[in-house]
Image (spheres, grey):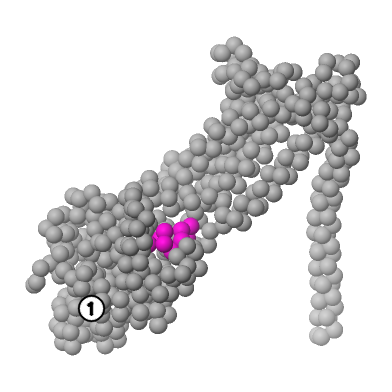
Amino acid sequence: MESAILRTENLKVSFGNTLVLKGINMDIPEKRVTAFMGPSGCGKTTILRAINRMHDLTPEAKVEGKIRLHYEDVYEMDAMQLRRNVGMVFQRPNPFPTMSIRENVLSGFMLNGIKLKKLEKEEITEDALKKVALWDEVKDKLHVRSTSLSGGQQQRLCLARAIAMKPEVILLDEPTSALDPLSTSKIEDLLYELKANYTLVIVTHNMQQAARISDMTAFFYLGELLEYDDTKKVFTNPKNEKTQNYITGRFG
Amino acid sequence: MMPRDIQGLKRRRAKDRIFSAFIWCLTISCLLVVTIILYYLFKEGISSINWALFSQNPKPVGETGGGILNAIVGSIMVVSIAAVIAIPLGVSVGIYLAENRGRKLTERLAVAVDVLQGIPSIVIGIIIYVWIVKPTGKFSAFSGSIALAIMMLPPIIKNTEETLVLIPRTLKEASLALGASYFKTTMKIVLPGGLGGIFTGCIIGIARIFGEVAPLLFTAFGNPELIFDPRKPVDTIPKVIFTYASSPYNDWHRIAWGGSLILVVFIILLNAVIKIFERKWRVQF
């Protein structure tokens, strides 16, 4: 495989006594879109949230095995440093409601205590909002509260918020599941463009979405990685029977 | 069948109407009580509201006139110091309770807050007397502030907790996912989102202690002079009302009514402030 930016080694995650991920080994290539697919409860969100250590917040969650970012074990790294390098977009748009659009884009810097000059702020805001194709829609109202935007716009704002920090990897947890089809296709177009500069990992329920935008597709089932290959191969010629059944809509 | 059904329906409708009327009557009578109290207070108190009431200290018995400047200053001092002590403490406890739900300490803490709310104010006064006044050997505004700070804590803690619990977990996660620390997340994301509720809790706390006299009897005690030093005993508005209303002098009764009116107007103003800021700081999640 071409250069892997992320690698999991026998990754196991359990909540209390329930083993949710049963030893996952996979390499995620740099500057590609990798889709995690599978029926509900298969562990795809769990593995995504293990990458940027969001399970640290859940006392009963236990992570075993290793995840390496550039060969460095993320569970040995400083969690804050890691998360600055690995951005995340959530299932439901969650812009900070007390902040304006501009403040939301710059919130990563503010929350990390990074002081910016006025000119830098303007540049970063414009750049990030242009990258998510939101600039033209909001450039005249950067000071208004972020919650006045539509759901699709809010989600693009959240993407801009993550991009502004210039992370290497962006994790997306079903980013379009709460959006209408038009907003969904906008986000998908964006992800396709963003992979030139970022490594994207997207969890999705939507098979067409995985087929449309991803380079690699991983199929999870009951906490195991059943199939992981080029998206084309997975969709046209799956090796595993379960994958085939899922793709053809026989279950899921 | 039909006629009987309709008859039953009629009775049910009648019951319904009686019930509604009953509720309406009770509501109105409650409103009426408040209105009568306010009316009476204004009627008796308005005549004693004059510049002297706010600008002069009390005069000795026998001399007419005088005011309660010393008590107004005393009340503001005692309550301000109490607020400075109680607000950071109460908000911190509220944050802890909201952030650590389901833990044993959280449950115990919540029970302790409920118990604290139920402790009679006179008991808190006695405890502070034993803990602070006796060891230091003197009554002081500061000891009164501590007693009032304890009384302020429950509403601040509860309001903070209840507001912060409503803040979606995903917002905290969004902040942490950007690499923010727990501290920054709390200060910049969680607290601003709950500002309205926390502020309301603080104002309710202040309103609760502003009219208290029992905890101050053994602590701030009383002082007919104008005092700015929290180490000395001071008068407060409720204390003046208590002393003057139970005196045999007509002139003093008048001043007690004036003081009561000031207290009530202040509480009404605080309530108006709460309404304004709740609206202004409401956050749509």
* Residue found 35% across the figure and 75% down from its top: A133
Name the residue type under label 1: Ser
In this orientation, does residue A195 appear?
Answer: yes
What secondary structure is found at the residue carrying circle 1? loop
Q: From the viewer's perspective, is B251 left or right of A43? A: right
Residue B133 percent coordinates (x, y): 60, 16
Q: From the viewer's perspective, is B8 left or right of A19? A: right
Residue A4 percent coordinates (x, y): 12, 67
- For residue B132, above or below residue B260: above
Residue A26 percent coordinates (x, y): 15, 68
Chain letter of the residue carrying label 1: A
Q: Which residues are magenta?
A: A97-105
Residue A247 percent coordinates (x, y): 25, 84
* Residue found 47% across the figure and 62% down from its top: A143
* Residue found 46% across the figure and 58% down from its top: A99
User: Is B272 or A133 nearer to us in this picture?
Assistant: A133
Residue named by callout 1 = A214
Residue situated furthest right in the rendering = B250
